[in-house]
Amino acid sequence: MKKINILFLLLLLSTPLISADPIPVYPKPHISNEGVSNGISQATTIPLSWLILVFLLDLGMNILIIYSGIIILRYLSRIPNSFLIDLPKKNLLASVFIISIIGIISEIIFGLWIGGFIIVILFIFFSFLLTAKKLLYLDWSNSSILGIIAIIINITTWSIIFLI
């Protein structure tokens, strides 16, 4: 009987979340009339600066995710101690850059509606999975653990941002 009550409560809570208005992740562009006299439009400066700021924050977060994932994999004795020493730094930076680009593009395209965050999570997981496999030379199980760590950290970050 308790299982039915919990499922009913989850169903009631999920319905308004699915049909809610989209969460404004990026600010709406606005046009100011300050530069109209000389033909300069200020329509793209705020979204572009916001996009650069979000990209830099995402880049830093992905560096932390990869390093924390490697530390967790080392703690679980799934990779050798010399993994970071043997790993070329350009591969590490390339994987962080690729993951950040995929993350920002997927958030812009699919993050406009609540159900799109599931697609964003899948994009993040597969980008971590494939870049960890191809550029960081991890096997599939370690790459999937790194992808799951990335999903958990991203969901936690989004929850903190949207609840504040």
Image (spheres, helix red, strand yellow):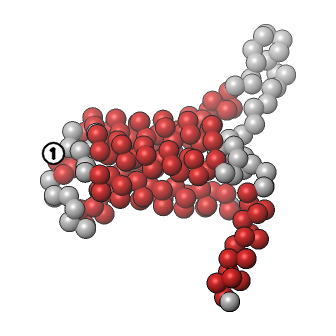
Residue 18: tell me if it is visible.
Answer: yes
Horizontally, residue 127 falls left or right of residue 154, namely left
Q: Residue at x 51, y 49 (%)?
A: 122
Horizontally, residue 108 falls left or right of residue 65, namely right
Rendered location of residue 4, percent (x, y): 68, 82
Along the line of sight, the residue nearer the viewer: 2 or 128: 2
Height in image: 47 above or below 5? above
**Outermost residue, top side:** 38
**Outermost residue, bottom side:** 1
Horizontally, residue 69 falls left or right of residue 117, namely left
Q: Quadrant of the N terminus?
A: bottom right
Q: Residue at x 20, y 65 (%)?
A: 77
Along the line of sight, the residue nearer the viewer: 56 or 16: 16
Image quadrant in which you'd find residue 164: bottom right
Along the line of sight, the residue nearer the viewer: 161 or 107: 107
Rendered location of residue 150, percent (x, y): 44, 55
Rendered location of residue 107, percent (x, y): 59, 42
Q: Residue at x 78, y 62 (%)?
A: 16
Rendered location of residue 48, percent (x, y): 63, 30
The residue pinned by badge 1 equals: 86
Q: Residue at x 48, y 61 (%)?
A: 152
Horizontally, residue 80 falls left or right of residue 8, namely left
Height in image: 35 above or below 127? above
Kind of residue sitting beneath label 1: Asp
Number of dots carrying numbers: 1
Height in image: 152 above or below 91? below
Residue 53: tell me if it is visible.
Answer: no
Q: Residues within 10 Å of mark 1 (few under 14, many from 20)?
A: few
Give the structural element (helix, strand or loop) at label 1.
Answer: helix
Along the line of sight, the residue nearer the viewer: 30 or 35: 30
